[in-house]
Image (cartoon, helix red, strand yellow):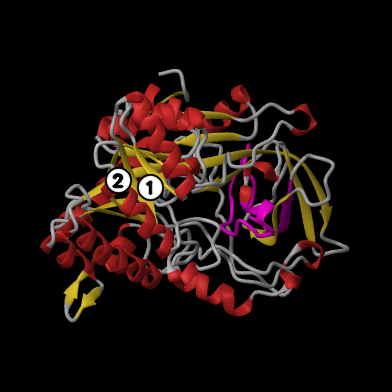
Amino acid sequence: MSVMQLANDATPCDAACPGTPLPSLRHPQVEALLRQHPEALHSLVDGLGSPLHLMLPQVFTGNVQRFQRTFEQHAVDGALLYAKKANKADCLVRACSQQGIGVDVASLGELEKTLGGGVPGPRIGISGPEKSQRLLELGLSHQCLLAIDSLNELRRLQQLAHDRGQAARLTLRQRPESHADSRFGLSPAECAQAIALCREDPRGLRLEGFSFHLGGYSCEQRVEAAAQLLTLCIDTRASGLDHCRRINLGGGFAVQYVSPQAWERFRQHNHPTHYHAGKSFSDFYPYGAPRACAEALADILAAPVEGTISLAQQAARHGIDFIIEPGRALLDQAGISAFRVQGVKDRRDSDGYALVTVQGSSFSLSEQWFNSEYLPEPVLLPASPREPEPFIACIGGSTCLEADMLTWRKIRFAHPVRPGDLLLYLNTAGYQMDSNESPFHEARLPHKVVIELDGGALRWQLDGLA
């Protein structure tokens, strides 16, 4: 072990720090990075600033391959579109290009970045409600697959297709019964009108299938919506629209950040006294989901929809393909956010815990800005060796906002936290590290560094330079 000894994440809390530890699960590459290269991590933050986001595209690629194997194991054709909104890093689009998968985008900027990163138009899906005219134009020019969210949008696309003399590739987004109040999607009546419009104009509107939008992580709701669209797809194709043979299952594949056992203990014992200032939260992400990522997809594909016939078997029987749009699930373990400790306010004598201030803010842990908490505990990487000593602390940002807390929950570290140390939040690539970043206080936006491990060697470069 180097002189920069890697401290344990957390130890069981005592009476001064009630609550359940939630150590982050670690991919082997993450474990190797932390154990073998602590000096390099300190050097990177020294040179590039705090916070610093570390990207691991090799892990991303492994997640892609696990989803692809799941489709193969269920003998069904499936296409992956990485949901680009989950992380802005350029290295991820390049990885998609190299792996031959697609990207889901919802803005002109995302589409331009994706095309520039080497992903061809036919492998790009464009979602989002009431797309701008320029986004429709560019999507049509590159033959992207457009998810249509309203009749007005469909008519705009039809006019554009006729003006350009091109057929528009599209899916119709239907609003599921379980989400009747959603602002997204077509009602069944509107969907019937849209199908009729496509049937009347097959040269301008090439209907390739259907999609839906679901909030949350219920596999059961996703199966129910998919089964309804599967029947609709079969009926629509039988009515003469021969290209209608795709169902987009969307994303919503939960990620397992912590062990299900630790998560269940946490849920049973969670209490406001475990947090700074007695903070309470109404809801949390399901950090310890028992079935996650590609396993969740396997459960969806294997679910029975007609007697003992599974969703995958029914789709294969009728020649119907699936599309999925994972974001967070493809980014599982593919990123780390490193924060330099700027100061420590020791209130252990009065309050029983310390307040650690890091260089940076909770804008870089976006869960905090949805009235929630990023619960996986940070790893302490000391700047110098020190003797073990339980140290209870919460972690705040360096802005002037009272609510700027990266971790409201009282964490028990195995070593004292001191200025100059690093706190590493693991598994932050999915929606955490850049969804709400802001140059508040004129602070620059954090850099992203692309990390590659080759045996014992570490190579890095700034994202976007390759």
Mark closer to the observer (1, 2): 2
Contact (Cβ within 8 Å) of mark 1 with mark 2:
yes
Q: Position of residue 46 (x, y in %)?
A: 62, 26
Task: Give the class, few, some or many, for how many residues have Cα within 10 Å of label 2's Cα (few <14, many ≥20).
Answer: many
Q: Residue 403 magenta-drawn? A: no
Of all residues shown, which one is farthest toward the front? 200
Q: Residue 375 magenta-drawn? A: yes
Which is more toward the observer, 33 or 399? 399
Which disc, if any, is residue 330? 1
What residue does disc 2 label? 80
Which is more toward the observer, 32 or 130? 130
The segment highlighted magenta reads 367-396
Is residue 452 visible to the viewer in this orientation of the structure?
no
For the residue labelled by badge 1, is the local secondary structure a helix, a strand or a loop? loop
Q: What residue type is labelled 1?
A: Leu
Is residue 387 visible to the viewer in this orientation of the structure?
yes
The relative height of residue 162 versus residue 304 in the rendered view (above or below) is above
